[in-house]
Every structure is written in C-alpha cells, then in structure tokens.
Amino acid sequence: MPKITIAQNILAANDTIAQEVQQSLATHGIRTINVMSSPGAGKTTLLERTIARLRGEMAIGVIEGDIETSADAERIETAGAETVQINTRGACHLEAHMIRAALKELDIAHINLLFIENIGNLVCPSEWDLGEDLRAVVVSTTEGDDKPAKYPQMFAVSQVMIVNKLDLLPYVDYDVEKVKRQALAINPQLRIFQVSCRTGEGLDAWCEWLVTFANGKS
C-alpha cells in the first residue's frame, strides 16, 4: 500500500503543475501536442517534415525529450523550429515540471503550435499529463502490428494515431487494417493518419489537420 500512496502523490503533484502549464499556454494562444511512440518509430523525422511544410504558415516550437544527447533537437532546429532540449539522464518519460522549466527557454509569445517529443516508450509517458491539449501516438510499419493490443493504455489516452513508414509496407509483414481495428477497439474516437515521411504520402492531410487544430477548430 505505501508504494501505491507514493505513486498517487507523485502523479497528483504532477497534475497540479500540468494544469499550470496548460493555463499558461492557453493564455498565449498556444495549442500543444504530446507526441509519443516507441524508439525508432519516426517521431523526429515526422516533426522535421511537418515543420518544413508549415514554415511560413505558423510558428512552431518543439520541446525535445531524450534520455541523452541533443542530436534530435539539433535536427529540429535545422528544420526551422525553436527548440529546447530536455535530457532526463535515465528517466523513461517527461514530467510536467520539466515542461514548465523548458517553457522559460522558449519565446512563447511568438509560437502558435508546440510539440512535445516525449521519450521513446509506449508505457510510462501515457501516465503523465504534461499540460498538453492533445496526445498523439506514432506507430511504424517496422515495429510489428501488435502495438495497440500490447500497450492499450497508450492508445486509450491518445486522441491521434499516426501510422508511419508506409513506404516500407512491401518489405515488412505489417497489417495496417489490423492495427487500426485494434486501436479503434480500444479508443473509438481515435483520429488516424497514415503517412510516409520518405515519400510524403499522407503528410498533406496531417498538416492540413494541424492548421485546423492550431486555430482551435479541431
């Protein structure tokens, strides 16, 4: 029982800070997406392609979470978005107090859309509210088509699922329709996008929806 109590207290404290973060972002008119996936699903590449397509249409900021290194943040900055790096030094997820601190390093007065790229993990990040407006989970054709069945909590708490690396379908044993069925059985309200960051397939629909979301219409 003490372990449960401690966990509840930690999450309660996190939720209080998350509410503070969300109120601050809302005050500045910023819509925020928490992007989650297993390692290698393509979160960073998706953000690179998204930033490139929306450049000039809206100002995008990214809070980049990694256990170590700033390699992904450097990629995002090169793509054209203001970026802050968070290194957790071993922790498997981001927490709201980390986001609150990172926001002090961003010029939030000039950002319309904020992405939080979470640590690559389909378990821990699903439990932690970061003050985001929406959660998006990225799955890819290279990691097996059983992820919704194996990690249902991640899909239950997400509002968007992005199936990435469609260009590799001819070379892998992956059933997109099966993944969609599994995910929708867990969360019937899940909005699904199918994309290839290599060929550009599906990115127009994804970016068009982001513009609507950023404008508060979705």
Image (tube, rainbow, N blue to C red):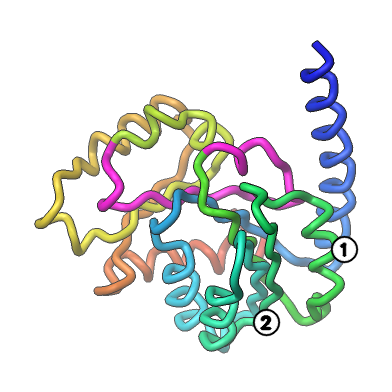
Give the alpha-carbon distance from disc 2 to disc 1, as whole Å. 19 Å
- Give above or below for 87 relative to 190: below
Nearer the viewer's eye, disc 2 or disc 1? 2
Residue 26 in sight here: no
- Please say whether residue 131 is one of the residues in the magenta stretch: yes
Name the secondary structure under disc 1: helix
Q: Are the residues flagged by discs 2 and 1 in contact, CB closer than 8 Å?
A: no
Along the horizontal axis of the image, is 19 left or right of 127? right
* Residue farthest along the left direction in this orientation: 170
The residue closer to the viewer here, 180 or 15, is 15
The residue closer to the viewer here, 133 or 62, is 62
Q: Residue at x 67, y 49 (%)?
A: 91
- Give above or below for 11 relative to 8: below
- Give the magenta range: 123-145
**Location of residue 99 in the rendering, given as x and y in whole percent from the top left corner:** 78, 59
Along the horizontal axis of the image, is 24 left or right of 205? right
Q: Residue at x 48, y 68 (%)?
A: 44
Numbered marks: total: 2
- Please say whether residue 175 is one of the residues in the magenta stretch: no
**Location of residue 175 in the rendering, given as x and y in whole percent from the top left corner:** 19, 41
Q: Which mark is residue 117?
A: none
Which residue, given by chain and number where applicable, does mark 2 sit on?
82
Which residue, given by chain and number where applicable, does mark 1 sit on?
27
**Location of residue 80 in the rendering, given as x and y in whole percent from the top left corner:** 57, 87
Give whichever of discs 2 and 1 has the lower sequence position: 1
Q: Quadrant of the N terminus?
A: top right
- Give the quadrant of residue 149: top left
Three-letter code for the amino acid on which mark 2 is drawn: Glu
